[in-house]
Image (cartoon, rainbow, N blue to C red):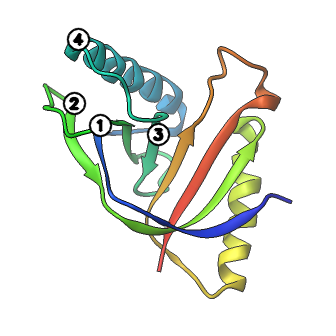
């Protein structure tokens, strides 16, 4: 059982790409988005202000509405499909998950049960912040911070 808690998230600036994709194209869309933003940050001579994230605005597997982004230290200009934006402050149910991405459905199930028990319901995006990379470590060691916006 994962440790799940309620947390207040403060607003922070980001560079992001908003797009739609199917579940089968998700991995490629995320990889492409992260690469574009990382290259743009390098071009600007800037570093990310934190780990990359993906926000999910729906859960229609054939037409996912996602935001791929990096936090930045201070607002930076966008370019092309890369937009300067901010993640607004929100209340989140949060869980630090260790393990393969393929097991996300189990942790989301636990988080939904926890929310139901605490009389909370989803109220916006689901955020996955990737604290390390599958190219660098075994799947069993992957760390993902999962946050579900709630009311």
Q: Earlier in the sequence, mark 4 or mark 3?
A: 4
Q: Earlier in the sequence, mark 4 or mark 2?
A: 4
Q: Earlier in the sequence, mark 1 or mark 4?
A: 1
SS of the residue under disc 1? strand
Q: Residues within 10 Å of mark 4 (few under 14, many from 20)?
A: few
Q: Residue at x 22, y 30 (%)?
A: 82
Q: Circle 1 sits on which residue?
A: 16
Q: Residue at x 18, y 33 (%)?
A: 76
Q: CA distance from mark 1 to mark 4?
A: 15 Å
Compared across the picture, whether 76 is left or right of 125 comes to left
Q: Circle 3 sits on which residue?
A: 53
Q: Residue at x 20, y 40 (%)?
A: 75
Q: Earlier in the sequence, mark 2 or mark 3?
A: 3
Q: Position of residue 50 (x, y in %)?
A: 45, 35
SS of the residue under disc 3? strand
Q: Determine which quarter of the picture holds residue 10.
A: bottom left
Q: Position of residue 126 (x, y in %)?
A: 49, 57
Q: CA distance from mark 2 to mark 3?
A: 14 Å
Q: Residue at x 46, y 22 (%)?
A: 31
SS of the residue under disc 2? loop
């Amino acid at each position: 059982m994962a440790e799940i808690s309620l947390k207040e998230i403060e607003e922070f600036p980001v560079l992001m790409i908003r797009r739609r994709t199917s579940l089968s194209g998700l991995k490629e869309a995320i990889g492409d988005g992260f690469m574009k933003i990382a290259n743009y940050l390098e071009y600007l001579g800037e570093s990310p202000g934190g780990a990359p994230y993906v926000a999910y605005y729906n859960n229609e597997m054939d037409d996912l509405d996602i935001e791929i982004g990096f936090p930045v230290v201070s607002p930076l200009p966008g370019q092309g499909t890369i937009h300067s934006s901010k993640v607004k402050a929100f209340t989140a149910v949060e869980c630090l998950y260790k393990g393969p991405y393929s097991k996300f459905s189990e942790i989301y199930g636990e988080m939904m049960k926890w929310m139901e028990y605490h009389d909370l319901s989803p109220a916006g995006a689901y955020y996955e912040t990737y604290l390390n990379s599958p190219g660098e470590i075994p799947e069993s060691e992957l760390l993902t911070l999962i946050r579900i916006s709630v009311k």
